[in-house]
Amino acid sequence: MTQPIAKRFPTPALDKLPEDIRTRIMGVQEKSGFVPNVFLSLAYRPDEFRAFFAYHDALMDKDSGLTKAEREMIVVATSAANQCHYCVIAHGAILRIRAKNPTIADQIAVNYRKADITPKQHAMLDFAMKVSRSAETIGEQDFAEVSGHGFSDDDIWDITAISAFFALSNRMANVTNMKPNDEFYLMGRLPK
């Protein structure tokens, strides 16, 4: 029996979606071999879908001082703290692939402080966690600590924006009870 994509809100039929959204979803399916449930779930509100994925792409796909794997580390660590089943599983798969490391996502999801990552990445995740869990307490000492590890102001902005954006994503996934696709569980775990 197939699990529903999300339990609370209806998943729109693909053929009923606006053309631009349908094209985007079909492109993802062609590239990955399946449609991640987040695309179908968020398509419930087309204008919000467009805004969500435009900001997602602006944060996660650009060239910056953070590697694509480091960006995924932020997502996995903060999503674990926010108890977001969907994002830990989905972005854990992406992290394993981008880092070319089958164990890194599990380590970061359970306790990034004990993960096999660099001191610079620990500092990045410390800052990201503070943004995610207690942003109101961030002060100059926090900026000094993260910049002391070589992060520029633009990098710190990216760490902040990714943490904040995925706090939104985590809450939407939790409220909708969005289920991760089965395909995510095995991705990046075995060498090809």
Image (cartoon, grey):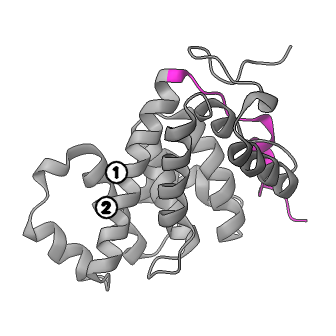
Q: In which quadrant will I find the C terminus?
A: bottom right
Identify residue type, mark 2: Thr
Counting the numbered discs, the total is 2
The verdict on residue 182 being magenta is: yes
The verdict on residue 156 being magenta is: no
Q: Is residue 46 above or below residue 141?
A: above
Q: Is residue 36 visible?
A: yes
Give the residue displayed 49% in from the left and 70% down from the top. 117
Give the residue displayed 65% in from the left and 28% down from the top. 179
Q: Which residues are magenta?
A: 176-192
**Residue 103, position as x, y percentages in the image:** 66, 57
**Residue 31, position as x, y percentages in the image:** 83, 58
Give the residue displayed 67% in from the left and 57% down from the top. 94
Q: Which residue, given by chain and number where applicable, does mark 2 sit on?
A: 160
Query: With 130 as the anchor, is 177 left or right in this view?
Result: right
Which is more toward the observer, 135 or 148? 135
Q: Is residue 115 visible?
A: no
Query: With 1 as the anchor, is 64 left or right in this view?
Result: left
Give the residue displayed 82% in from the left and 54% down from the top. 32
Label 1 and label 2: CA atoms lie apart by 6 Å
Query: With 113 as the anchor, is 88 left or right in this view?
Result: right
**Residue 70, position as x, y percentages in the image:** 50, 69
Marks 1 & 2, CB-CB < 8 Å contact: yes
Q: Is residue 45 above or below residue 107?
A: above
Which secondary structure lies at badge 2?
helix
On residue 164, which mark appears?
1
